[in-house]
Amino acid sequence: MKKLLRVLCCLILSTVCQAQTAGSRPPNIIFILIDDMGWADGECFGSKFYQTPGLNRLSAQGLRFTSAYASCAVCSPTRAAIQTGKSPARLHLTDWIPGEGTPKNSRFTLPLWQKSLLPQETTLAEALKKRGYATAHIGKWHLGGPECFPEKQGFDLNIAGGHIGHPASYFWPYGEKGNSHQVPGLAEKGGKEGEYLTDRLTDEAIAYISSHQDKPFYLQLAHYAVHGPLQGKKDLIEEAATHAPSNGQANTTYAAMIRSMDESVSRILAKLDELKLSDHTIVVFTSDNGGVVHFGTPTATSNAPLRQGKGFAYEGGLRVPLIVKVPGMTKAGQVSDVPVISTDFFPTLLELVGAPPEASATAVDGISFAPVLRGEKSLPRDTFFWHYPHYWNGGAITPYSVIRSGNWKLIRFYETGKEELYDLGKDLSETTDLAPGNPAKAGELSGKLDAWLASVGAQLPVAR
C-alpha cells in the first residue's frame, strides 16, 4: 500500500509539472553556476562558519543533493560538460584553458587536447532556443576565444563572458585597461568606485529577468566568485571576523565572497517573488569543481570531511553543492544522496520543460535526473567516470582517471602507475586504500575504466 501511494504521489507531481510545461508558456530557467565553491561552503551544506541565508531559503524550497559531482575537478571541462551533456574526455576538453603544460621531470607530456568548446557542438542554450526560449549568459565563460563565445553558442545575450578564467579585480573597473584578466565589457558600460563584481553581475541578471518576464527565458548566471583573487567587501570581511572558525573554514575574505554570492541568490529569489515568477521558474544552483585548498592564509576553505579539493581526484575536488527547485515538482526541503553529475543538466532541464527525449540526443553522457526531483530514490545508473591527463598546480596534481561504481571508487595515477581503491560508503574521507587487500575489485574497476576510456576516445598522457 505504501509503495502504491508513493507511485500515485509521483504521478500527481509529474502531472502538475507537465501541466505547467504543456501550457501556453514553459517555465523559465535560472542556472546559477559558482566558480570554485566547495561541497560544504554554506550553512545548508553543513558549514558553521559561512552565513548563507539565501542558499538556506533556496534549499528549504527545493531539493539539495549531497552526492552531486562536477565532470572535472577544474573549471573549463565542467563548463563544457554542462553546455553539451558530453564528458570532457569525449570532447577532448580536459583542462582549464589554456592549462599549465608539463613539469620538466614528468614522465609524460600532454595530448593535443581541445582548448575551446567548438561551435559545432550542440549546447543547452541552442536546444532551448529551438523551444522558443530567450537565452542569456551573464558572467564567466572560459571556453575559448571570440569564435566560441556565448553569442556563438546559442545565447542571445552575453554580458561579461569571454576567454578569461578569473577577474583581475573584483572591484570596478575589474582590472586596469589592457590587463589580460580584465572582465570583458563591463568597464565600457560604466560603473562606480567600490562597485563589486558579484553585485554588478546580479544587477545585470535582475535587469534581464525584469525585461523578459513576459516570455520564457533561460538565464545562465555564472559568477566569477568565489575564484581567486581573494577579495571581499570590507564590511563583510569584518562581519566574518566575528564568526568562530569551524571545521577548517576560517578565511574571512573568502567568507565575505561567499556572503556576497549568497546575497546574489537572495536578490534573484526576491525579484522572482516581486514579479510573481517564483512559481514558474526552475532554479539550479551548483559549482564547477570542489573548493580551493591550495592557497590562502588561512586556506581559502575546507571541504572536510571530504579529502583535498580543487584539481584533486579525491572527493573534495569532485563533489560540489547542488540545489534544484522545480515548482510543482520538488518537495520543499528534501535531500537526496542519489549521485548526479554535470552532464546530466542538459537532458534533465529539457525534460522538465517538456521536450521529447530526442531533443537531448546529443547529450550522450548525461541522463535526466528528473525522476529524483519527482521523489524517486535511484536512477538507472551507478557508474561515473573522470579523466584528467594533465598536470596542475606546479605538478602537485598529476594525470589521473577515476571510476566510481556504486560505493566503490578507483583512482588511477599515471605518473606512478598506482591505483587506489576506496569504499565511499564506509570511508567518505578516502583514508584507507583497499587496493592491496582487494585486488579482485580493483581489477574489475580498472577493466571498466579501460573500457570507458576507449569508448569515448579519451586522450591519454603521452610518454616522453
Image (spheres, rainbow, N blue to C red):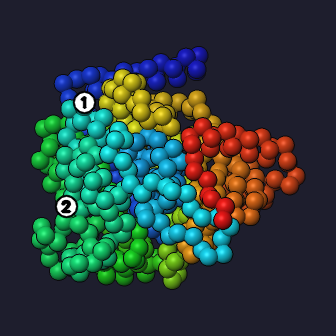
Q: Amino acid at mark 1?
A: Arg
Depth order, front residue of 373/160: 160
| Marking on residue 203 | 2
Among all residues in the image, which is located at the extreme front? 464
Element type at mark 2: helix
Query: Could you tell me which residue is drawn at 24 percent across and 36 percent down?
Result: 129
Left or right of residue 423: residue 89: left
Q: Which mark is residue 131?
A: 1
Q: Position of residue 173 (x, y in %)?
A: 20, 76
Tell me the tag on residue 90: none
**Tag 2: residue type?**
Asp
Residue at the farthest right position? 437
Callout in the foreground (2, 1): 1
Task: Answer above or below: position of 190 versus 4.
Answer: below
Relative image position of residue 133 (x, y in whole percent): 22, 36
Residue 408 placement, left or right of 153:
right
User: Image point 15% across, 42% down: which residue?
Assistant: 213
Where 358 sits versus 114, above or below? Answer: above
- The front one of 65 and 46 is 65
Residue 166 placement, left or right of 194:
right
Quarter of the figure with residue 1: top right
Query: CB under 8 Å between callouts 2 and 1?
Result: no
The kind of secondary structure element at disc 1 is loop
Of residue 405 and residue 41, the one placed in the foreground of this image is 405
Assess disc 2: are there few (<14), some (14-19) or many (≥20) residues with their C-alpha within 10 Å of its C-alpha. some
- Residue 20's quadrant in the figure? top left
Q: Quadrant of the C terminus?
A: bottom right
